[in-house]
Image (tube, helix red, strand yellow):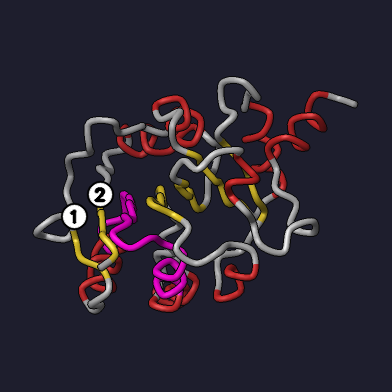
Amino acid sequence: MDDLKKKRDFFELNLKLEIKFNFRKVYGNDNPVHLEIGSGRGEFLLHKSVQHPDVNFLAIELKEKRIKTIIRQLDTKINKNVRVARLFVDEKITDYIPEESFQMIYIIHPDPWPKRKHHKNRLIQHCFIDVLWRIMKPGGFIEISTDHKEYANWIVQHFRERKDFESVYDKGFTKNPEEEHIETFFEKKKREEGFEPFFMKYRKV
Protein backbone atom coordinates (compact mmCIF):
# COMPACT_ATOMS: atom_id res chain seq x y z
CA MET A 1 0.00 0.00 0.00
CA ASP A 2 1.59 3.32 -1.05
CA ASP A 3 1.92 6.30 1.27
CA LEU A 4 -0.89 8.33 -0.32
CA LYS A 5 -3.30 5.40 -0.01
CA LYS A 6 -2.45 4.99 3.68
CA LYS A 7 -2.97 8.71 4.26
CA ARG A 8 -6.27 8.73 2.39
CA ASP A 9 -7.51 5.82 4.50
CA PHE A 10 -6.71 7.85 7.63
CA PHE A 11 -7.69 11.40 6.64
CA GLU A 12 -10.47 11.09 4.06
CA LEU A 13 -14.05 10.53 5.18
CA ASN A 14 -15.85 8.03 3.00
CA LEU A 15 -19.35 9.27 2.25
CA LYS A 16 -20.40 5.81 1.08
CA LEU A 17 -19.70 4.27 4.48
CA GLU A 18 -21.33 6.96 6.59
CA ILE A 19 -24.97 7.95 6.62
CA LYS A 20 -24.19 10.74 9.03
CA PHE A 21 -20.77 11.53 10.39
CA ASN A 22 -20.38 10.74 14.07
CA PHE A 23 -17.60 13.17 14.92
CA ARG A 24 -16.86 11.53 18.25
CA LYS A 25 -16.27 8.29 16.36
CA VAL A 26 -14.33 10.00 13.54
CA TYR A 27 -11.88 11.86 15.80
CA GLY A 28 -11.99 9.70 18.89
CA ASN A 29 -12.81 12.63 21.20
CA ASP A 30 -15.40 15.28 22.01
CA ASN A 31 -13.31 18.30 21.04
CA PRO A 32 -15.05 21.13 19.13
CA VAL A 33 -15.10 20.75 15.35
CA HIS A 34 -14.17 23.55 12.94
CA LEU A 35 -15.01 23.45 9.23
CA GLU A 36 -13.03 24.92 6.33
CA ILE A 37 -14.95 25.22 3.06
CA GLY A 38 -12.63 25.17 0.05
CA SER A 39 -9.16 24.40 1.40
CA GLY A 40 -7.16 25.10 -1.77
CA ARG A 41 -3.52 24.13 -1.24
CA GLY A 42 -4.18 23.37 2.41
CA GLU A 43 -1.81 25.90 4.03
CA PHE A 44 -4.47 27.34 6.34
CA LEU A 45 -5.66 23.91 7.42
CA LEU A 46 -2.17 22.56 8.12
CA HIS A 47 -1.10 25.53 10.24
CA LYS A 48 -4.43 25.90 12.04
CA SER A 49 -4.48 22.25 13.10
CA VAL A 50 -1.02 22.64 14.66
CA GLN A 51 -1.98 25.91 16.38
CA HIS A 52 -5.02 24.21 17.93
CA PRO A 53 -4.39 20.52 18.68
CA ASP A 54 -7.44 20.55 20.98
CA VAL A 55 -9.74 21.37 18.03
CA ASN A 56 -10.87 18.96 15.31
CA PHE A 57 -10.81 20.25 11.73
CA LEU A 58 -12.86 19.13 8.74
CA ALA A 59 -11.86 20.35 5.27
CA ILE A 60 -14.38 20.23 2.44
CA GLU A 61 -13.09 20.23 -1.13
CA LEU A 62 -14.64 19.22 -4.45
CA LYS A 63 -11.60 18.89 -6.71
CA GLU A 64 -9.79 15.56 -6.55
CA LYS A 65 -6.43 17.17 -7.34
CA ARG A 66 -6.72 19.53 -4.38
CA ILE A 67 -7.75 16.72 -2.04
CA LYS A 68 -4.63 14.77 -3.01
CA THR A 69 -2.47 17.88 -2.56
CA ILE A 70 -3.84 18.45 0.93
CA ILE A 71 -3.59 14.83 2.06
CA ARG A 72 0.01 14.48 0.81
CA GLN A 73 1.03 17.30 3.18
CA LEU A 74 -0.75 15.91 6.23
CA ASP A 75 1.02 13.84 8.86
CA THR A 76 -0.93 11.26 10.86
CA LYS A 77 0.86 12.30 14.08
CA ILE A 78 1.16 16.07 13.63
CA ASN A 79 -2.24 16.62 11.98
CA LYS A 80 -4.21 13.75 13.51
CA ASN A 81 -7.04 16.20 14.29
CA VAL A 82 -7.75 16.77 10.55
CA ARG A 83 -10.17 15.03 8.21
CA VAL A 84 -11.02 15.78 4.57
CA ALA A 85 -14.28 15.15 2.71
CA ARG A 86 -15.38 15.57 -0.88
CA LEU A 87 -18.73 17.14 -0.19
CA PHE A 88 -20.90 19.85 -1.73
CA VAL A 89 -22.37 22.41 0.65
CA ASP A 90 -26.07 22.61 -0.12
CA GLU A 91 -29.36 21.72 1.56
CA LYS A 92 -28.46 18.01 1.33
CA ILE A 93 -25.36 18.39 3.50
CA THR A 94 -27.33 17.43 6.61
CA ASP A 95 -27.68 13.95 5.08
CA TYR A 96 -24.03 13.58 6.19
CA ILE A 97 -23.40 16.26 8.78
CA PRO A 98 -25.64 16.57 11.86
CA GLU A 99 -27.18 19.97 12.49
CA GLU A 100 -25.37 22.23 14.98
CA SER A 101 -22.02 20.47 14.47
CA PHE A 102 -19.50 23.30 14.04
CA GLN A 103 -18.22 25.93 16.44
CA MET A 104 -16.36 27.74 13.65
CA ILE A 105 -16.53 27.86 9.84
CA TYR A 106 -13.75 29.31 7.68
CA ILE A 107 -14.16 30.48 4.09
CA ILE A 108 -10.82 31.80 2.85
CA HIS A 109 -10.81 33.80 -0.41
CA PRO A 110 -13.75 32.22 -2.24
CA ASP A 111 -13.93 32.82 -5.99
CA PRO A 112 -15.33 36.38 -6.45
CA TRP A 113 -16.86 35.70 -9.89
CA PRO A 114 -16.39 39.40 -10.75
CA LYS A 115 -18.57 39.62 -13.89
CA ARG A 116 -22.18 40.54 -13.15
CA LYS A 117 -23.52 37.69 -15.29
CA HIS A 118 -21.56 35.25 -13.08
CA HIS A 119 -22.74 36.60 -9.71
CA LYS A 120 -25.20 33.71 -9.49
CA ASN A 121 -22.15 31.42 -9.13
CA ARG A 122 -20.86 33.17 -6.02
CA LEU A 123 -20.65 30.99 -2.95
CA ILE A 124 -22.16 33.57 -0.62
CA GLN A 125 -25.89 33.54 -1.34
CA HIS A 126 -28.80 33.47 1.10
CA CYS A 127 -29.53 29.79 0.39
CA PHE A 128 -25.88 28.98 1.22
CA ILE A 129 -25.99 31.01 4.45
CA ASP A 130 -29.18 29.14 5.39
CA VAL A 131 -27.24 25.87 5.18
CA LEU A 132 -24.36 27.26 7.27
CA TRP A 133 -26.84 28.33 9.96
CA ARG A 134 -28.19 24.77 10.16
CA ILE A 135 -24.81 23.09 10.66
CA MET A 136 -23.42 25.68 13.12
CA LYS A 137 -23.69 25.53 16.88
CA PRO A 138 -25.58 28.39 18.56
CA GLY A 139 -23.12 31.22 19.13
CA GLY A 140 -20.70 29.79 16.56
CA PHE A 141 -18.71 31.97 14.17
CA ILE A 142 -18.10 32.26 10.43
CA GLU A 143 -14.84 33.85 9.25
CA ILE A 144 -14.67 34.99 5.61
CA SER A 145 -11.90 36.80 3.75
CA THR A 146 -11.62 38.23 0.24
CA ASP A 147 -9.35 40.70 -1.54
CA HIS A 148 -12.11 41.65 -3.98
CA LYS A 149 -13.74 44.88 -2.74
CA GLU A 150 -17.02 44.47 -4.58
CA TYR A 151 -17.39 40.90 -3.35
CA ALA A 152 -16.64 42.07 0.20
CA ASN A 153 -19.51 44.58 -0.13
CA TRP A 154 -21.72 41.78 -1.50
CA ILE A 155 -20.95 39.57 1.51
CA VAL A 156 -21.48 42.37 4.03
CA GLN A 157 -24.82 43.30 2.43
CA HIS A 158 -26.05 39.70 2.43
CA PHE A 159 -25.37 39.29 6.13
CA ARG A 160 -26.90 42.70 6.93
CA GLU A 161 -30.13 41.49 5.39
CA ARG A 162 -30.35 38.66 7.92
CA LYS A 163 -31.38 38.52 11.56
CA ASP A 164 -29.81 35.12 12.32
CA PHE A 165 -26.20 36.38 12.18
CA GLU A 166 -24.50 39.45 13.60
CA SER A 167 -21.22 41.01 12.54
CA VAL A 168 -18.31 41.18 14.98
CA TYR A 169 -17.12 44.36 13.23
CA ASP A 170 -19.09 47.62 13.19
CA LYS A 171 -18.57 48.21 9.46
CA GLY A 172 -19.13 44.55 8.66
CA PHE A 173 -15.43 44.01 7.97
CA THR A 174 -11.90 44.90 9.07
CA LYS A 175 -8.61 45.26 7.21
CA ASN A 176 -6.65 44.11 10.27
CA PRO A 177 -6.42 40.32 10.65
CA GLU A 178 -6.61 38.63 14.03
CA GLU A 179 -3.40 37.79 15.89
CA GLU A 180 -3.33 34.15 14.75
CA HIS A 181 -3.91 35.04 11.10
CA ILE A 182 -2.40 32.58 8.61
CA GLU A 183 -1.33 34.12 5.29
CA THR A 184 -1.82 31.66 2.45
CA PHE A 185 0.19 31.56 -0.77
CA PHE A 186 -2.71 33.12 -2.65
CA GLU A 187 -3.16 35.95 -0.14
CA LYS A 188 0.56 36.77 -0.16
CA LYS A 189 0.60 36.85 -3.96
CA LYS A 190 -2.40 39.18 -4.15
CA ARG A 191 -0.97 41.49 -1.47
CA GLU A 192 2.19 41.83 -3.57
CA GLU A 193 -0.07 42.86 -6.46
CA GLY A 194 -1.62 45.56 -4.27
CA PHE A 195 -4.85 43.82 -3.24
CA GLU A 196 -5.37 44.02 0.52
CA PRO A 197 -7.87 41.54 1.97
CA PHE A 198 -11.09 42.29 3.80
CA PHE A 199 -11.85 40.17 6.86
CA MET A 200 -15.43 39.47 7.97
CA LYS A 201 -16.65 37.58 11.01
CA TYR A 202 -20.23 36.71 11.94
CA ARG A 203 -21.82 35.08 14.98
CA LYS A 204 -24.89 32.86 14.80
CA VAL A 205 -27.67 34.33 16.92
Q: Is residue 45 above or below residue 150?
A: above
Which quadrant of the figure has residue 12?
Answer: top right
Residue 131 on the magenta segment: yes
Q: Residue at x 61, y 38 (%)?
A: 28
Furthest-left residue in this view = 170
The local crowd at label 1, few if under 14, some if 14 to 19, many if 20 or more residues have their Cα within 10 Å, is many
Could you tell me which secondary element the residue under label 2 belongs to? strand
Residue in the foreground of this view, choosing between 6 and 151? 6
The local crowd at label 2, few if under 14, some if 14 to 19, many if 20 or more residues have their Cα within 10 Å, is many
Identify which amino acid the numbered label 2 is placed on. Answer: Phe
Residue 155 on the magenta segment: no
The region drawn magenta spans 128-150
Q: Residue at x 38, y 77 (%)?
A: 126
In the rendering, at what x and y percent does residue 147 appear? 31, 49
Q: How many marks?
A: 2
Which quadrant of the figure has residue 195?
Answer: top left
Identify which amino acid the numbered label 1 is placed on. Answer: Phe
Q: Residue at x 39, y 69 (%)?
A: 133
Q: Residue at x 29, y 64 (%)?
A: 204
- Which sits earlier in the primary sequence, circle 2 or circle 1? 1
Q: Along the horizontal axis of the image, is 205 left or right of 77?
A: left
Q: Is residue 137 above or below residue 178?
A: below
Q: Along the horizontal axis of the image, is 86 left or right of 9?
A: left
Residue for badge 1: 173
Residue in the foreground of this view, choosing between 141 and 150? 141
Residue for badge 2: 199
Could you tell me which secondary element the residue under label 1 belongs to? loop
Which quadrant of the figure has residue 69?
Answer: top right
Furthest-right residue in this view = 1
Q: Along the horizontal axis of the image, is 137 left or right of 69?
A: left
Q: Quadrant of the N terminus?
A: top right
